[in-house]
């Protein structure tokens, strides 16, 4: 029979020896790198949102992990940000302004694409310009640059509009993919659409280009990169690295158009758009980093003028446009 004291002695010896071995091994193994900081990104599936989507691919270089979530339209991101599910969103500026007007605690920290809108009509109607939209049904998605630029062009042409019959132009609201289907089936005569969907309609011959609606005081629309106040204030170092990553992704796309095309066509659209679709779309939707406070304010003023967003208290651009992180990222940029 084994003596209890002897068992205890052996047990103590082996435990001590095991601990010593573990300590020795630990000393030889470098400490594991801490987990990358998580940033939850809300994005949309458009060609000119490609550089923002590409950020998740290079995020590890900036000690970040970017989890991207795709939404149908910019306004859909607002509830997710309110619920604390999204840290940064890429959307139409108009959607961002509407969100801020409803009390969403966010800052506008950059712009990421210019243009990206085209007004396209049925080829059989032979529409040559905005004046020819009188008596027509025009489809558009609510709350984006396609809506506000359409209204600016109609105003310039002195045409009235409503979502009910009786005005010069009848507006029909629907989602982005539904616009193309409605034009194809002739349920609408014209659509004010985003890229690459407007270009696809033209290439597939059920749409004819009417105008790129940039000849108004609004000029070309700029899409907005928006960050929660919580991230901006409580995680400034993470916020800065995110903006560093954003600048790097944008410049990678600008420097290498083949990389941009391959990523957008294959990774985002799974080869559902052709090379011609992509190139014509990007000719009308330029990747950028910049946005100005004055452009944000002018867009806000036009939204109020046309009733877009139905804002009870429109936000003043000076109160929520914060471009300091972007400027620092641009100055410190170096390829990694």
Image: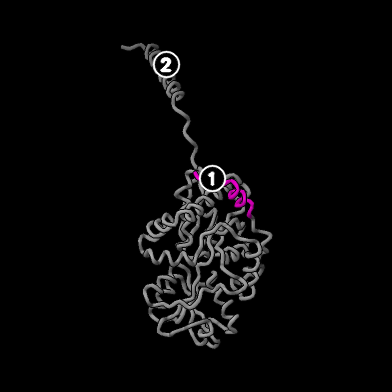
Q: Quadrant of residue 268?
A: bottom left
Between 116 and 21, which is closer to the camera in this rendering?
A: 116
Query: What percent of the width, then of the height, locates residue 178?
Result: 42, 73
- Which residue is drawn at the image coordinates 63% and 70% (left, top)? 311
- Which residue is drawn at the image coordinates 56% and 50% (left, top)? 243
Q: Is residue 158 above or below residue 229?
A: below
Query: What percent of the width, then of the height, locates residue 295?
Result: 63, 65
Task: Say what secondary structure mark 1 lies in.
Answer: loop
Q: Magenta segment range?
A: 323-336
Query: What percent of the width, then of the height, locates residue 234?
Result: 62, 47
Between 114 and 307, which is closer to the camera in this rendering?
A: 114
On the image, numbered disc 1 is attached to which residue? 334
Within 10 angstroms of label 1, few (less than 14), some, or many (20 or more) residues?
Answer: few
Q: Quadrant of residue 167?
A: bottom right
Q: Which mark is residue 12?
A: 2
Q: Is residue 324 above or below residue 315?
A: above
């Amino acid at each position: 029979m084994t003596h209890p004291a002897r068992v205890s002695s052996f047990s103590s010896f082996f435990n001590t020896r095991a601990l010593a071995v573990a300590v020795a091994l630990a000393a030889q193994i470098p400490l594991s790198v801490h987990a990358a900081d998580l940033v939850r990104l809300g994005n949309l599936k458009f060609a000119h949102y490609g550089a923002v989507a590409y950020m998740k691919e290079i995020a590890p270089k900036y000690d970040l992990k970017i989890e991207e979530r795709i939404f149908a339209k910019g306004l859909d991101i607002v509830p997710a940000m309110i619920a604390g599910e999204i840290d940064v969103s890429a959307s139409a500026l108009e959607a961002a302004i509407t969100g801020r007007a409803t009390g969403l605690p966010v800052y506008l920290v950059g712009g990421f694409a210019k243009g990206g809108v085209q007004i396209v009509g049925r080829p059989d109607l032979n529409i040559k310009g905005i004046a020819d939209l009188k008596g027509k049904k025009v489809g558009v998605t609510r709350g984006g640059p396609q809506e506000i630029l359409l209204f600016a062009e109609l105003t310039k042409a002195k045409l009235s509009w409503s979502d009910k019959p009786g005005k010069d132009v009848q507006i029909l609201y629907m989602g982005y993919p539904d616009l193309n289907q409605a034009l194809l089936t002739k349920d609408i005569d014209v659509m004010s659409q985003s890229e690459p969907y407007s270009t696809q309609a033209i290439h597939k011959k059920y749409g004819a280009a009417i105008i790129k609606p940039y000849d108004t005081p609004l000029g070309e629309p700029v899409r907005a990169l928006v960050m929660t106040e919580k991230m901006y204030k409580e995680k400034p170092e993470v916020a800065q690295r995110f903006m560093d990553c954003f600048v790097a992704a944008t410049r990678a796309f600008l420097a290498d158009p083949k990389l941009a095309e391959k990523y957008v066509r294959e990774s985002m659209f799974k080869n559902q758009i052709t090379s011609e679709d992509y190139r014509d779309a990007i000719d009308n939707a330029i990747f950028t980093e910049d946005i100005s406070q004055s452009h944000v304010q002018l867009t806000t003023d036009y939204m109020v003028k046309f009733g877009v967003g139905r804002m009870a208290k429109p936000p003043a651009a000076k109160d929520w446009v914060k471009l300091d992180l972007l400027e620092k990222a641009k100055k410190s940029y170096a390829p990694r």
